[in-house]
Image (cartoon, helix red, strand yellow):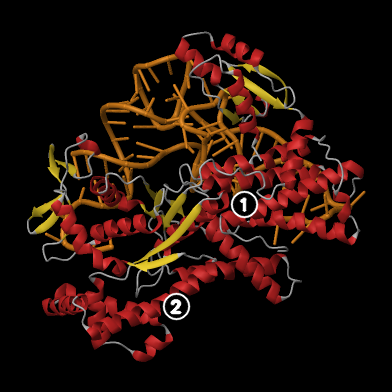
Amino acid sequence: MQTIPTLLESRLRAALTDFPGAEPKVAAVNDARFGDYQTNAAMVLAKQARANPRQLAQQIIDKLDVADLCVPPEIAGAGFINFRLRPEALAARFVELARDERLGVPVPAKVKSIVIDFSGPNIAKPMHVGHIRSTILGDSLARIAEFLGHRVVRDNHIGDWGTQFGMLLVGWKTILDREALARDPIAEMERIYKDVNARQQADESVREAARAELVKLQAGDEENLAIWREMIRLSQAQFEAIYGRLGIRFDVTLGESFYNPWLREVVTDLAARGIARESEGAMCVFSDRSGPEKDDPFLISRDGQWVDIPALVQKADGAANYTTTDLATLAHRLREWTPDEIVYVTDGRQQHHFRQVFAIFRRWKSDADVKLAHVWFGSILGEDGKPFKTRSGDTVKLADLLDEAEERAFALVSEKNPTLDERDRREIARVVGLGAVKYADLLPNRQSDYVFSWEKMLSFQGNTAPYLQYSYVRIRSIFRKAAEQGAGSREQGAIVLEALAELALAKKLAQFGEVVPQILDDYRPNLLANYLYELAATFHSFFESCPVLKSEGATQATRLALCNVSARVLAKGLALLGIEAPERM
RNA sequence: GCACUCGUAGCUCAAUUGGAUAGAGCAUCUGACUACGGAUCAGAAGGUUACAAGUUCGACUCUUGUCGAGUGCACCA
């Protein structure tokens, strides 16, 4: 089905045929005094034509046929045209919405193929807070793109290759504790890595040993390869456990090592095309001076001079690095899926890296028609405003964080609802605790840093997951009660929107289909989080002033339908954020 | 030094990408508990959007400058 703005836009387009250059754009109004929707087409047009905007607005209105949808449009302010929906029109849209499986979310004009690269944990290391945002944000974007109808490839690019394996191999061969490994493989691998890493800082011989093990691994030494595969196997179990808890799946999980066979080819091809050249023993990509210096990712200003800051695609020792791997990965994804879009979800510190990779790629595959997006995000801070750490100063492990979320939620549920049996409370605590963590991550604008606060994210007041889940629970509770009273079938019947709170809720529900498609424009799930909060607040307000089960006839049918659609939109919206909605809590 | 991202109510954050009188939640204050689970709702108060110019019908948003914060800046990813 079409959204109301789309409907109004098509009417507006018809009215604007005599006004070339006008954009028939209709937007929701935030202030109810100005109606429900508005267009500023007249003002845009007036600017181009140097005409009087209010007069133009009147001319547009004269040609505009929206009588079935709105009361006569008004001209306001500098030249806004305001639309106020007729209650019958809103009711008609609501009936359509209630029948629509997509809850009013339109099918996109162009179905795209989108690769989303997110999470990207490292072998032999615990997943920690640094992985939360990428994992949760990427998963939510994938869910939203899929729901819209795009073809999505969820790609987990695992860190399974690199210099750290030299140290890990040294540790594995010299100080590995087999019992500890059996008990907690990740902790043991982390221990040996930290131990060797600390010693190699001061001891040249340790550094040399690590380098030697790494060279052997890269040369295909069977023993080292076997150990490396064992480390991968042990790590995979950890990843699967965490993704299972978070309800996250991937279509493709390929380590960096998968791309090794193409690395040399990438470098020689770049060199052959004159994109990369040798410098100080390394193969580098320098600026092609095609744009302004300040926008050039291969230049930097030092002491008032623009100097080269090339991207290395091969180190002086002959090894490739992550830029090379990223280029090989890009080429592979292009061959494999011919995507319209590849999205990288990583933290903001990698902006420069991706600007370089994308720029090299454009020179290398200049005919490729693919959008490359670096969807970056800020840091998670502790309450002190510094990067989020444990009290002892270590990074917070993701598994511990999820445990604590569930424990805290369990304590809350037990306090609020002690009569439920423990198994139910555990399940509710799981849904509420994980929901709180995810929602806290998705609510702020992704580019800003945010302060991690258990108290805030688990509060039942304000813009939190528990508040949204509670709204859903309350609606479900009404339907349970209605079923007890045999009122289930009373939902059938004419929809008549009368009370202000009913109209407000119907209007808010219709906006779901307007909000969801916007999210991918700039990869911002927080738009959905904000919408859901507004919906929940609008619902609570309706629910407070409009009794459902005590009402009768068409009024009750209307209110039950409003409740039903509210519950579906809330549950669907939360699901798009990767959050479950419990039946009770 | 240069680049990127910011600076919004006491605190934590929004603002439909240039739209109307900048919105929420905490905290503070005032109401509603014979309740479809009050885990809620209604309301009040709180602002020179860091500062200064500029662009225009209109600026938190764009431009320039200043002050302040975080991040990054060739062989780690």
On the image, the x and y values in percent for residue A257 come to 29, 69
Circles 2 and 1: CB distance less than 8 Å? no
The amino acid pointed to by label 1 is Gly
Name the disc covering residue A237, or none.
2
On the image, the x and y values in percent for residue A432 come to 62, 63
As rendered, which of A19 and A214 lies closer to the eye? A19
Please say whether residue A4 is visible from this viewpoint: yes
Please say whether residue A186 is visible from this viewpoint: no
Chain hosting mark 2: A
Q: Is residue A332 left or right of residue A510?
A: left
The amino acid pointed to by label 2 is Ala
Pointer 2 and pointer 1 on the same chain: yes
Q: Is residue A474 left or right of residue A386?
A: right
Image quadrant containing the N terminus of chain A: top right
Name the disc covering residue A573, or none.
1
Find numbered disc 2 in the image and state the secondary structure of the residue it sits on: helix
Query: Which residue: 82% across, 45% down?
Result: A559
Up-down relation of residue A214 to residue A159 (above or below): below
Up-down relation of residue A78 to residue A116 (above or below): above
Image quadrant containing the C terminus of chain A: bottom right
On the image, the x and y values in percent for residue A232 come to 36, 77
Mark 2 / mark 1, whichever is N-terminal:
2
Disc 2 to disc 1, C-alpha distance: 30 Å
Name the disc covering residue A361, or none.
none
Up-down relation of residue A310 to residue B50 (above or below): below
Query: Which residue: 86% across, 41% down?
Result: A494
